[in-house]
Image (tube, rainbow, N blue to C red):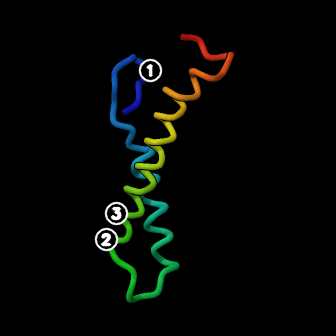
Amino acid sequence: MRRGDDGASRINSPQILGGLSAAALSNAYFPAQDRGANLVFVDGLGDLGGNMVDNLTREFLLSRITTRAKR
C-alpha cells in the first residue's frame, strides 16, 4: 500500500508490476526447460516480499536508532 497525493491509501501497482516485469525479463535467461509462469510469479513475489521487509525495517527499526527521525 502507498499513500496518494490526496492522502488516501492505494495499492502500489508500479512496484508490483515492476517486480513482475523484472521477473519476466529474467525468465529469458533460464534454460528452456526451466522457464514458465510459475518461475515469474515466484520471483516476482520474492521481490515483493523483499520490498516489504525493507520497508518494515526502515519504518520500525531504523527510525528508533537514527537521530534524524521525527516521531
Question: Do the residues under discs 2 and 3 have CB atoms within 8 angstroms?
Answer: yes
Tag 3: amino acid: Phe
Q: Kindly identify the residue that appears in the image at 32 percent across and 71 percent down.
A: 37
Tell me where residue 20 appears, x and y as whole percent: 41, 58
For mark 3, give the secondary structure.
helix
Question: Do the residues under discs 1 and 2 have CB atoms within 8 angstroms?
Answer: no
Q: Which of marks 1 and 2 is nearer the N terminus?
A: 1
Residue position marked by numbered label 1 in the rendering: 5
Tag 2: amino acid: Asn
Q: How many marks?
A: 3
Tag 1: amino acid: Asp
Q: Which of marks 3 and 1 is nearer the N terminus?
A: 1
Name the quadrant of the N terminus: top left
Q: Kindly identify the residue that appears in the image at 66 percent across and 22 percent down.
A: 66
Residue 40 in the image: above or below residue 31: above
* The one of 34 and 68 positioned closer to us in this rendering: 68
For mark 1, give the secondary structure.
loop
Tell me where residue 15 appears, x and y as whole percent: 45, 45
Q: Residue 11 occupies which quadrant of the picture?
A: top left
The 10 Å Cα crowd at callout 3, few under 14, some 14 to 19, many 20 or more, is some
Residue 37 in the image: above or below residue 20: below
Residue 39 in the image: above or below residue 20: below
Q: Which numbered mark, 1 or 2, is in the foreground of this view?
A: 2
Q: Which residue lies furthest to the right in this view?
A: 67
Q: Which numbered mark, 3 or 1, is in the foreground of this view?
A: 3
Q: How far apart in space, not on screen, are marks 1 and 2 (Cα)? A: 35 Å
Residue position marked by numbered label 2 in the rendering: 38
The 10 Å Cα crowd at callout 1, few under 14, some 14 to 19, many 20 or more, is few
For mark 2, give the secondary structure.
helix
Q: How far apart in space, not on screen, are marks 2 and 3 (Cα)? A: 5 Å
Q: Residue 41 carries which label?
A: 3
Q: Residue furthest top?
A: 71
